[in-house]
Structure formats: structure tokens, C-alpha cells
Image (cartoon, rainbow, N blue to C red):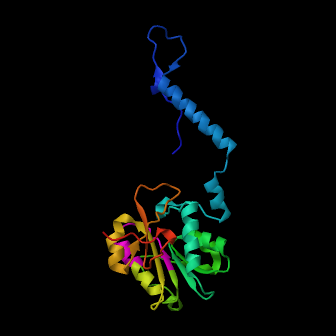
Amino acid sequence: MEEELPTHKNVVDDDTDEDDPPALSSQALAALKEFLQEQTQSLANPETEEAKAESEVGLVTEDWRLSQFWYDPQTARTISHEVVSLCTDSHHKVACIACPTLYAYLKNLDPTISVRLLEYDKRFEQYGSDFMFYDYNQPEDLPLELKHNYKVVIADPPYLSKECLEKVAQTISFLAHPQESYLLLLTGEVQRDRAAELLGLRPCHFRPQHSSKLGNEFRLFTNYDPLERLGGWEQEI
């Protein structure tokens, strides 16, 4: 939301002389000063460090109507490095479910890594054959060649509802290699019990952050203990 200049409500009325110019209250003057300082800083620094980092990996603008909220650069880089560390073999494949930020950072970190992005937003068709349209309401409406074909599966369900997580969990199970696979789920703290029940996941100490500073507490859940990476698993109480 853009800041607004003080309105007429901030003007101090002077009943004694209507011809005197209107005077701003001290509160209004402070607000005006802060506004002008921010405008000056914006002109001097047209691109913040985070915006620059995001532009380097080709992110499109968030669409709040699709519940899109991109990770901040530190979060995206941290998780991308974790995923790359899990791909110890060049044949290992990665699936990103509804997390285009991670796809972009992964390809920026290692262009040779095999990553498939399953995403509803068709703007990401720009990624070519790496993109596959995905609607969580049809969790297994995917080509059979994708079944049990991924060593690493990362998912960020667009909504915090029980139904959404249950259906995304179906997709994760469809994609993940049955013998050995690494699962990473990014979702709200409110989904802790469901993540454990549906997929056997536990929360890590690492706390993901978003560029938009969401109000909900966000967590990273995994089916393996990353040990010193990501701060390891939280100890059960």
C-alpha cells in the first residue's frame, strides 16, 4: 500500500482569521517528512538488494489471487543448496510442486540439474519442457512417466486447508521414488500434525521467510534429518 500525503483532516483550523494559510499539525508534519524521505531513498536506490536478487533468477510478479508469495532470497538460496546437496547422482531428478521460486533459484544455482515444475500459473510456461500444468484438485492427473520418478520432491501447497494438503500429499506420493526419496514441504505451522500424519514429516529449525512478510508462521518439514543443515530437526517434546 502506498503512503498518502496528509489529508485535510490533519489541518489545524484557525477560527480567528480565515485568510491565514492552513497549518499542519506536528503529527502531520512528521508524516510528511517521513514520506518525503522514503521517496528520496526510492529515487536514490530504485532497486533494492532483494529485488535485484529476484530479477537475477527471472521471477515474475506475485499473483495474490493465486495465493502466490515468493520466498525471500536467503530462504530460496538456502533451500536450493539443500536440494543440490541431496542430488548426489547426476541422474537424480527433482520435482517442485507449486514453488516456482525454488525452481528458478535451483536452475540459477545449477543449470544442469533435472527439475520439473508442477504449477497452475501458465505464465511459467516460459520454462519450456520443465513446466507442467498442475491443479491440486486433480492430484494424480499427471503423465504416467512421472510416477515414482523423483528422488527429491518439494511442495508448497497454495492454501493452508486440510483438503489442499491432503491432495498435494497424494501428488507427492505419486511422484516420489518409493524406495528412497527426500521430501520437503513448505507450509504453515498449523499443518504440523497433518504433515506428520500424511507423510511422516517433521519440522526443521530453519524458518522460511517470504518477501511479502506473511503473518502466518511458516515452516519447513522433511522426511529426513538434515543434521547440521537447516538447523536439523526440532526435538520432539
Q: Is residue 235 above or below residue 171?
A: above
Left or right: 86, with 128 as reference point: left
- The picture places residue 86, in percent across and down from the top left corner, at 55, 80
- Inspect this view and state whether residue 161 appears: no
Left or right: 125, with 229 as reference point: right
**Residue numbers of the magenta segment:** 153-168
Residue 34 in which image quadrant: top right
In magenta segment, residue 167: yes
Q: Residue at x 61, y 79 (%)?
A: 130
Q: Residue at x 67, y 42 (%)?
A: 43
**Front residue of 150 and 133:** 150
**Front residue of 183 and 97:** 183
- The picture places residue 47, in percent across and down from the top left corner, at 66, 51
**Front residue of 19 and 74:** 74
Q: In the current view of this chain or complex, which residue is farthest to the top? A: 16
Q: Is residue 3 above or below residue 111?
A: above
- The picture places residue 115, in percent across and down from the top left corner, at 59, 80
Q: Residue at x 67, y 80 (%)?
A: 112
- The picture places residue 104, in percent across and down from the top left corner, at 61, 70
Number of marks present in the image shown: 0
Quadrant (top left/top right/bottom left/bottom right) for the C terminus:
bottom left
- Inspect this view and state whether residue 165 appears: yes
Residue 127 in which image quadrant: bottom right
Q: Is residue 141 above or below residue 54?
A: below
In magenta segment, residue 74: no
